[in-house]
Image (cartoon, grey):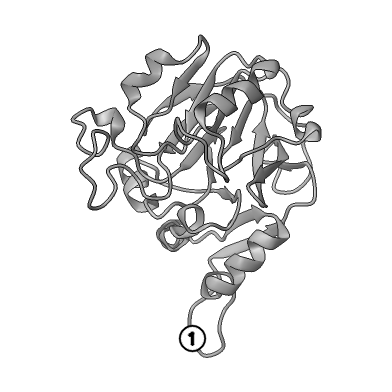
Amino acid sequence: MKVTILGSGTSTGVPMVGCTCRGCSSNDERDKRTRASLLVRQNGRNILIDASPDLRFQALREGIERVDAVLFTHSHADHVNGIDDLRGFYFLHKEIIPCFGSPDTLDTLLSGFGYIFHELEGSGYTPLLEPHEISGTFKLFGLTIIPIPLEHGRTSAMGYRIGNFAYLTDCSGLPDSSLAMLEGLELLVIDGLRWNPHPFHFNIEAVITATLPLKPERTVLTHLTHDVLFSDGAKLPPGYEFARDGMTFDITAIEAQAGGSHA
């Protein structure tokens, strides 16, 4: 299973418009970050996690020729506003793309992007995406997808564990029940917004404290602001590093039994 970090930046991206700080002015290409999203490739299938506003650019950069399913973490704009870019994959392959998310997330998507999910009477537009509410662990193209509930300030978000890999973007806390689902990871990609505290995201110190007991083989901090330079990763403890756009990993895939949704 191959995992690619399509975007490693926070909601503004880096550089941020109008800013001339050291991060936004950096000449290090690793400090240039599009909005957070991720791709899982397995058995010829592409599973996208979130549709950032930079999805078109990310897909062109990584040579993504098809998207077979989308997992949404939550409905904030920097994670869903690229949903319209999924139309191009439908135009090429004429296959409706299944999308998965919590009931609240799907309600927001159906309200804001109804034309993609439903044919509006007289419009001539056919549905391009198919919504599926997540109620627990499910199977997708032979993989077991485990939703991980996350605290995101006063709201909630959803992470995902797939085999020995977990992606937990946009979180400020991990409930005990979620921690129990995150043992034995080969790779953990998790929110590590910035050095200073934030009410809705883990900062770097807090996320290290929260994840040390899990002892993943490798922990990559993503959703980074312009306050974080990639070169500052030298300050992190062993086993921790900063994400960068285009970063790829080969992960042991644990195959699920055949059957279930989209198996």
Residue type at tag 1: Ser
Residue at x 80%, y 45% (from the top left corner) = 136
- Assign a secondary structure to mark 1: loop
**Frontmost residue, 10 versus 29:** 10
The residue lying toward the viewer, choosing from 104 and 61, is: 104
Q: Quadrant of the N terminus?
A: top right
Vertical relation: 19 (above or below) 220: below
Residue 152 seen in this snapshot: yes
Q: Closest to the observer: 19 or 1?
A: 19
**Is residue 44 shown to the viewer in this render?**
no
Front residue (pair 200, 96): 200
User: Looking at the picture, how far across and down is residue 222, in whole percent?
Assistant: 47, 33
Q: Position of residue 241 (x, y in %)?
A: 45, 19
User: Which residue, given by chain and number where applicable, does mark 1 sit on?
Assistant: 123
Identity of the residue drawn at 40% across and 40% down: 9
Q: Mark 1: few, some, or many residues within 10 Å (few <14, many ≥20)?
A: few
Residue 162 x %, y %: 66, 32
The x and y percentages for residue 204 are 51, 27
**Count the marks: how many?**
1
User: Residue at 63% across / 46% down in the picture?
Assistant: 152
Q: Give the residue at the far top of this rendering.
A: 238
Asked if 218 appears above or below 247 in the picture, the reply is above
